[in-house]
Image: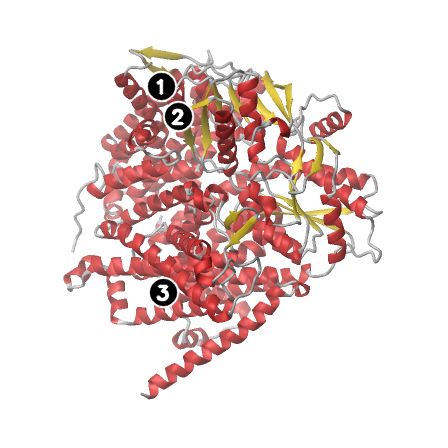
Amino acid sequence: MQHPFEHFLQQIVFGLQAGSTYALIALGYTMVYGVLRLINFAHGDVYMVGMYITVLSVRAIYLHHWISPSWEMLCIVLLLSMIGCGLLGVIIERLAYRPLRKAPRLAALITAIGVSLLLENTGNLDSVFGSSPLTCKDVLPGGHTDFNIGGVLIERNYLVIFVATIVLLAILWFVVSKTRLGRAMRAVSQDVDAASLMGVNTNKVISFTFFVGSALAGAAGCLFASMTPNSINPYIGILPGVKAFVAAVLGGIGNIPGAAVGGFLMGLAESLVVAYGPLIHLGNGYNDAAAFAILILILLFRPTGLFGRGITEKV
Amino acid sequence: MKRTLVNILIVAATVAIVFGLDKVVSRLQNDPSLHAGYPVRILMLALIAVIAAVSLNLVNGFTGQFSMGHAAFYGIGAYTGAALTVFAQKQLFGHILAIGEETGWWLSSGVLLLAMLVGGLAAALTGFVVGLPSLKLRGDYLAIMTVGFNMIVVVIANNLKEMGGAAGFNGVYVGDTLIGIPPLTTFFWVALVAIAVVVLSINLRRSVHGLAFESIREDEIAAEAMGIPTTRYKVTAFVLAAFIAGAAGALYVHFDLRVSPADIDFIVSINFVVMVVLGGLGSVSGAVIGAILLTVLPEALRMNGSYRLVIYSIMLIVLMLVRPQGIFGRDEIGRAWMLKQVQGTKTLPARISGWTASLFDRFAHRRLSS
Amino acid sequence: MNLSRTGKWMSVALPAVAAALLIAGCHGGATKSSGILIGEYGALSGDTATFGTSTDKGVRMAIDEVNSKGGVGGKKVQVKVYDDQGLPPQAKTVVTKLIEQDGAIAVLGEVASTNSMAAAPECQKSKVPMITPASTNVAVTKTGDYIFRTCFIDPFQGGVMASFATKSLHAKTAAVLTDVSQDYSKGLAAAFKNTFTRLGGKIVAEESYEKGAADYHAQLSSIQAAKPDVVFVPGYYNNVGAIGRTARSLGLTVPLLGGDGWDSDKLFEAAQGSLEGCYFSNHYSIENKDPRVQEFVAAYRKQNGGESPDAMAALAYDATKILIAAFDKAGSPADGDYSSEEYRAKLRDAIAATKDFKGVTGDITLGPDRDAIKPAVVLQIHGSERRFVATVNPKDIPL
């Protein structure tokens, strides 16, 4: 029997594991929202496409015996997914959102929903991905590996996701806060017109934002498909997409570290509710409801999200 | 005085016409040799969607707030309404109804109105609880609250053993006999409620309160500065919308004679939002057309087999690109609108070429500016 | 700019066009087809599309076989399928369309009980026989005397694994991991708990996951802490693979047990060996040497790129074959009109009289409740094979 404190730490680890994917998806949501004030509904489906890129390219690699499972293989599929999804994001922005930039804000939301439906239902066609679930073959050598640190079990594959999330987050933070492009992004997010007047090529910046956000969703999809034991289907992106959106708001929408923290909190809320829900006589089957209720409560007390800035509006 | 008389006459005429149509529709519905059950079903579903979409328009269109969980209120209305007419069936009707049993018009209408009232009130009450804290704030927080709330309601419905849980609810079995949801919803009531909700919305829009709603949409801070109690107005719109959605849910459940967690899922909420925005955010006529279009279009595309939803989603995208402000923008169908349509009438080919040209202009212009 | 005015013109035109299409749709279908039309509805899109697609494959195989042997009474059998997106109101809509517009004489479908229960009243009202291949909720066939099923009901199948766990595995304690958004999973879990406790066992942990779940660590570690002898996981193959792998990575090594939702090649692909030695209940064993099973499996594999039929496909195949046999039994109508109410009543009676039908999924008899009465088999997973372990008869289950 695990010591209660070890048990608690273990649940924290599980929560962080599950939260890593939410964090990566939430980053893309928050970046796009920060720049365009658009809830990019198709984001969860870009994440789904990232999974398929991974699973199908791993399949091709196995079929042609190009390389055996290794860290290189992970890097290759990760890059493929990120680039593929990044490009997909840029194309979606170009075709479905850019023409509506001057239109009422919710118009782009509807095209976003349209794009989301399009990706799901196109993926569902037998000639594309098909409806039956796919599972990724091993990308890393050694099958299942884990470490036991002080009674707490840490699985290598989840550690990979966690570390990759942190690394990507750090890179993103660096890009946004230290580079010229990042500064342009921040400028656009504050005021598109003003940024444009200051000589910022807003279209380029917005395309770049979409590329980065979607590439992160691609990374999340790749890591989820290749590192966790889950099977994938064309509709798998919907729910994580919604959850990541909530996570992004929780962290203070538009705020990059906030989105990551929100994502991790989402994972923690889910795993802690499962582990400790029975103690407060929370009926079996209410896990998701409880997780959402916790998030709503947090939001009630911190309306701008955990890291959101206070709203100052021009009058 | 004369005006009141005219109004009464108009109301009476409307009721009479709807009543007459109801006879036709019920004949179509009940005579299998007419093969009309399918179009009638689509018609009824479209009208129920109209009620829900017009009510959502009060929040998302008039007041400029952003609710993404309208199906939750619809669902609360449906589940509460069904609970009333199933669990209290003996009290309401005097005995347990057999499947397909006809009850008197007045009795069944009375029970339906009661179910709508109870369902609506239940939805309004939860709407108040959810809306009050989130509407004090500005921004998209209402969206998150309502998404979360919708998820929670679905989970509760999934776990509601007494009402079928995940399998959904169509009544309770006592031994092998089903105490079913009585088929109370008729075309008469659906159409009448739809018309009433539309008229109410349009009148509201033209009233002082409507202007207050719209001022919040245009600029909340300015509205507040003008002395408009913004939170109160926002909560009022939200609760009213929840009430109507709840009533629509009660209508739905007594038409479909079943409800399940899948009927009130988040995806359904999204569909309501699409109806409202596609029709033209803030336009009542738009919400009506959006609701009808989104109910009919997927059916009209059935012949395309597995490509149906692919075509549907492309149509959605293209329509929004062509009409970013929605089909009606913020206009309403009416005399002014008709006059606007007739002005400068051109022949169809001229219109199409003009449209193409302007579309081209738009893209060319954008290219230059980028 | 001209756009807004034109746009408004379009705004009137679009719904008008849509309405016109609808009306066209009505009129197009109202003509009676002279052939035999069977309607099918199922989820061909949405997150349960994989089940609807398998069902469709099974139905089509059966229909193709019948037609290649000359059809029914010299007439080819046609099947028309509509996608209900896995949504109950849509299921009801498409079944109405199948019956009223297309003139379907009988209807096959759904997997999810929720959808079958939504559509069944339409079939009952119009007196069109409906056979659901895979809806397990008891209430489905209670709708009326035109509604049949060819699969087990939840209380039986849940009981099968409970009785197997106590009698053959000598389990004293069990844990249950349920998918609370699936009625099927909840039904099986409830039946398992009921029978297991009746047989003297103890349920030591109950955990659950929901639609779209992607992580099972928290649930399985709680189960592990309760140290059960077996874990009952009545889910579908798209989740169970991940559950198996997560359980093993946590060091939870006791056998996992499941129901017919496990039966798919996809499970072995997803589980990657983690379910080695685990058991699940099913309708038949794919290794059964009986030629009717072997021919079906071989033909299915040939048509579907080597993939073995899952439970849905096999059940749908049998449901279709039962329907065809009923057509044969009812004989050709004297006036040649298969769509008359009189003929449909005859067809219904023929289906209801199905006795010892030699199906792929067992010898099927439809009982007085219009539910299939047939034994279940318990299979054990070895590599990517399902090995036959035991047969459990309905009378073996204490209810």
Quadrant housing residue C167: top right
Alpha carbon separation for disc pair 3 and 1: 52 Å
The amino acid pointed to by label 3 is: Arg
Left or right for B99, reference B11: right
Tag 3 residue? B330
Q: Are marks 3 and 1 in contact (CB under 8 Å)?
A: no
Residue name at image x 30 percent, y 57 percent: B238
The amino acid pointed to by label 2 is: Gln
| Badge 3 and badge 2 both on one subunit | no
State the SS at label 2.
helix
Tag 1 residue? A159
Residue B103 % position (x, y): 52, 66
Tag shown at residue C40: none
Total label count?
Answer: 3
Can residue B60 be seen here? no
Alpha carbon separation for disc pair 1 and 2: 19 Å
| Badge 1 and badge 2 both on one subunit | no
Where B55 sits versus A294, above or below? Answer: below
Tell me if mark 2 has few (under 14), some (14-19) or many (20+) residues whose alpha carbon lies within 10 angstroms of its own: many
Tag 2 residue? C219
Name the mark nearer the viewer: 1 or 2: 2
Can residue A1 be seen here? yes
Q: Nearer the viewer, residue C381 or C124?
A: C124
The amino acid pointed to by label 1 is: Leu
Tell me if mark 3 has few (under 14), some (14-19) or many (20+) residues whose alpha carbon lies within 10 angstroms of its own: some
Q: Nearer the viewer, residue B332 or A158?
A: A158
Alpha carbon separation for disc pair 3 and 2: 50 Å
Residue name at image x 63 percent, y 29 percent: C395
Name the mark nearer the viewer: 3 or 1: 1
Residue name at image x 48 percent, y 28 percent: C193
